């Protein structure tokens, strides 16, 4: 079945990394079709207003519009040629550009929703002071406002194709598994690690508890085991239906020491996973997008993060 990917690009190294990642993932996911989408720069409102009554301003506006369109087409054709050189068929790659209408984030989301895309892929800038502003204005907003379509955030040059799913047993976590199954199913080469962090009482309450509450933690752990065992039964069924066999699935469970998000980030780094898949919200308000997925988004580097609503 065809999987439609919207690659939101600009003329930056971050977009190039996102494209390289998408191409690399085509080795573990068949039937990808891509649309390279570029939103053209904002045109000065002053010039737009002046162009309504001033001939020279109108001529200048037309010149800027034409240049923006030409520059955008140049960026898109450059990226398309880069993808074709990897051996991917020309007809599987579409290009699209438009002037900014609703705002960069809204224009990307509008295109993705109207086109019924299966994922939005965007390159993430680094974490310098200036680049954090980009995270606040573009990448984080895409994640926050994409209520239906998963967003893949690619940080730098991701080379590993190994996959980890952060599983907390929630409905959102099950949808993350569903998305992964659809995107990479029917591939006997892939390996998927389901990683679960056993919560403690402090994950549900901000009060700083002492060791006297070890009994409560044990009760929580027992309940969590029953809950996650039931979840794994559903996950195995979904994977089997997608053509992912039992020997392709590994389950890792760890006890939470500091916080759930840190445990996920540490495991992703330690296991050298190229892709981390996570639901935006978890089993309780304290989890995913919430505190956990936001923590993971802020601190994940040198890999791709799939955030699934």
Image (cartoon, rainbow, N blue to C red):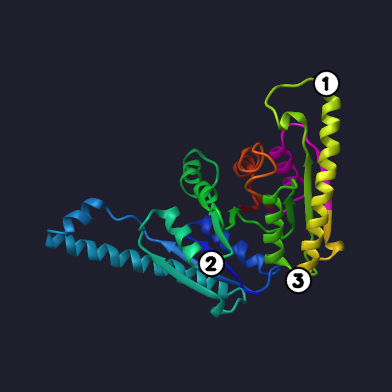
The x and y percentages for residue 299 are 63, 41
Element type where label 3 sits in the image: loop
Q: From the image, which quarter does the N terminus lie in?
A: bottom right
Query: How many angstroms separate mark 2 from mark 1 (CA)?
Result: 51 Å
The x and y percentages for residue 4 are 58, 69
Q: Earlier in the sequence, mark 3 or mark 2?
A: 2
- Residue at point 50%, 47% (across, down): 141
Element type where label 2 sits in the image: loop
Q: As displayed, is residue 82 above or below residue 203?
A: below
- Name the side, left or right, on which 52 lies relative to 118: left
Nearer the observer, 171 or 14: 171
- Mark 2: few, some, or many residues within 10 Å (few <14, many ≥20)? some
Q: Can the viewer see residue 11?
A: no
Residue 186 - label:
3
Q: Which image quadrant for residue 19? A: bottom right
Residue designated by label 2: 116
The x and y percentages for residue 104 are 42, 54
- Mark 1: few, some, or many residues within 10 Å (few <14, many ≥20)? few
Query: How many angstroms separate mark 3 from mark 2 (CA)?
Result: 22 Å
- Residue at point 66%, 50% (across, down): 279
The x and y percentages for residue 105 are 45, 53
Query: How many angstroms separate mark 3 from mark 1 (CA)?
Result: 47 Å
**Do the CB atoms of the residues marked 3 and 2 lie less than 8 Å apart?**
no
Nearer the observer, 42 or 227: 227
Query: Is 270 in the magenta?
Result: yes
Q: Earlier in the sequence, mark 3 or mark 1?
A: 3
Nearer the observer, 198 or 73: 198
Nearer the observer, disc 3 or disc 2?
A: 2
What residue span does the magenta drawing correspond to?
Answer: 251-276
Q: Can the viewer see residue 222?
A: yes
Q: Earlier in the sequence, mark 2 or mark 1?
A: 2
């Amino acid at each position: 079945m065809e999987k439609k990917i919207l690659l939101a690009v600009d003329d930056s190294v971050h977009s190039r990394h996102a494209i390289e990642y998408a191409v690399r993932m085509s080795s573990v996911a068949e039937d990808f079709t891509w649309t390279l989408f570029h939103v053209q720069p904002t045109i000065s409102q002053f010039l737009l207003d002046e162009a309504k009554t001033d001939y020279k301003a109108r001529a200048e506006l037309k010149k800027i519009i034409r240049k923006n369109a030409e520059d955008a087409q140049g960026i898109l054709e450059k990226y398309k040629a880069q993808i074709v050189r990897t051996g991917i068929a020309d007809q599987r790659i579409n290009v699209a550009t438009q002037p900014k209408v609703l705002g960069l984030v809204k224009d990307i989301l509008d295109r993705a929703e109207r086109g019924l895309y299966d994922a939005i892929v965007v390159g993430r800038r680094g974490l310098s002071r200036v680049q954090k502003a980009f995270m606040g204005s573009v990448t984080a907003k895409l994640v926050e406002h994409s209520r239906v379509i998963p967003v893949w955030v690619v940080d730098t040059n991701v080379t590993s194709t190994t996959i980890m799913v952060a599983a907390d047993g929630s409905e959102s976590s099950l949808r993350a598994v569903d998305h992964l199954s659809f995107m990479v199913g029917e591939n006997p080469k892939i390996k998927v690690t389901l990683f679960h962090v056993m919560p403690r009482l402090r994950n549900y309450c901000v009060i700083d508890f002492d060791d006297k509450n070890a009994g409560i933690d044990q009760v929580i752990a027992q309940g969590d085991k029953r809950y996650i065992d039931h979840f794994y039964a559903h996950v195995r069924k979904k994977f089997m239906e997608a053509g992912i066999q039992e020997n392709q699935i590994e389950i890792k469970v760890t006890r939470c020491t500091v916080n759930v998000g840190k445990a996920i980030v540490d495991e992703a780094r330690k296991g050298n996973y190229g892709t981390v898949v996570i639901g935006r919200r978890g089993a309780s308000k304290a989890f995913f997008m919430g505190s956990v997925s936001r923590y993971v988004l802020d601190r994940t580097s040198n890999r791709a993060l799939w955030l699934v609503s």
